[in-house]
Image (tube, rainbow, N blue to C red):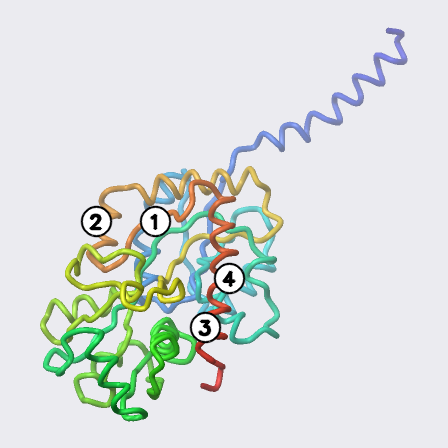
Amino acid sequence: MDRRTFCAAASAAAWLLPLAARAAVPYPTRPVRVISPYAAGGGPDVQLRQAGPVLGEALGQPVVIENKVGAAGVLAAQYVAQQPADGYTLLMGSNTHLIQKALQPDLKFDPVADFKPVANLASSPTVLVVRADAPWKTLDELVADAKAKPGQMNYGSGGIGTSAHLAGATLASLAGLKVTHIPLKGSVEIAASLLRGDTQFAFPVAGTGVPQVKAGKLRALAVTSRRRLPLLPEVPTLDERLKNELAVQESWFGLWAPAKTPDAIVAALYAAMAKTVRTPALQASFEAAGNEAALLGDSPQAFAAFVRSEHRKWAEIVRLAGVTVNS
């Protein structure tokens, strides 16, 4: 090698060295923000905050939870989608984002194209409940009475497009019922509405409904999970009665990153989430609240495939139930 060639090679190596050094910088080197679309103190937000310290320990950096509430989670999603794709600002993504896109196709965000799903944190079904002293002991009895009294039964929810609304609308559609949806001021109003007699049945999330059932205020007739809940082993799934995949409806939430986030960062986040979800104390805490700590896939790619399948499923549920933002 002559002197001129040697100098050129040395110069190229010197130029490449900073790039290699930068590429080797471990992730993360500073706190990671997770944007929660739920109000502080709400069920999923509580679970996220319980998981935050465990996830931070797995990552080796603090995890900071920030609430950005509005438009049923859309504001938080739009915000995170516009952040740098460096793994330091993540979204607490959920099936709610898929539902809102199905309800409002013109929304200026795409829950599939704008994000890379990283890993799921938890999932929870809804529970079909009636008042504890209601005459219906089983789902079949409720369905038979609703058919005998078309237009005379109401079901409540925390609002249009919520899991309780869609579960009720799905039951009505698949079972051929003529019932009225009553959107309440929030999910916390569901039990009170049933106890007053304003509504006859409802589908609160398990974290809300199960404690009311255990307290003897409400009676559970079915759950929308794929399998029976360990907390309510005697209560059948809705799918056992309706024999339709659309009757399996579980709310889930986990970490999503902006779409252009490097795969290596997504892989690091997945590994930390897997360690977090498998922590026995966290699993026990989630189960006590009616949730299940669940990854829903053994890799980021598997979770992304799950999100895409759920995107199609919730769009079909919205279409089948005839739900609109004004219904």
Q: Which residue is mark 2?
A: 284
Please give the name of the residue rendered at 17% of the width and 84% of the height, measured from the top-left corner: 195
Of pointers 1 and 2, the one earlier in the residue sequence: 2
Counting other residues with Cα less than 10 Å from the Cα at mark 4, is it few (<14), some (14-19), or many (20 or more)?
Answer: some
Of pointers 2 and 4, the one earlier in the residue sequence: 2
Badge number at residue 294: 1
Q: Nearer the viewer, residue 116 or 297?
A: 297
Does dot 1 land on a helix, a strand or a loop? loop
Tell me the distance, in whole angstroms, between the alpha carbons under discs 4 and 1.
Answer: 18 Å
Q: Which residue is mark 3?
A: 72
Which amino acid lies under the numbered mark 1 shown in the image of this protein?
Ala
Please give the name of the residue rendered at 49% of the width and 40% of the height, measured from the top-left corner: 28
Q: Dividing the picture into quarters, in which one does residue 213 lie?
A: bottom left
Give the label, 4 or 1, closer to the camera.
Answer: 4
Q: Position of residue 97 (x, y in %)?
A: 48, 66
Say left or right for 116 vs 153: right
Q: Which residue is mark 4?
A: 311
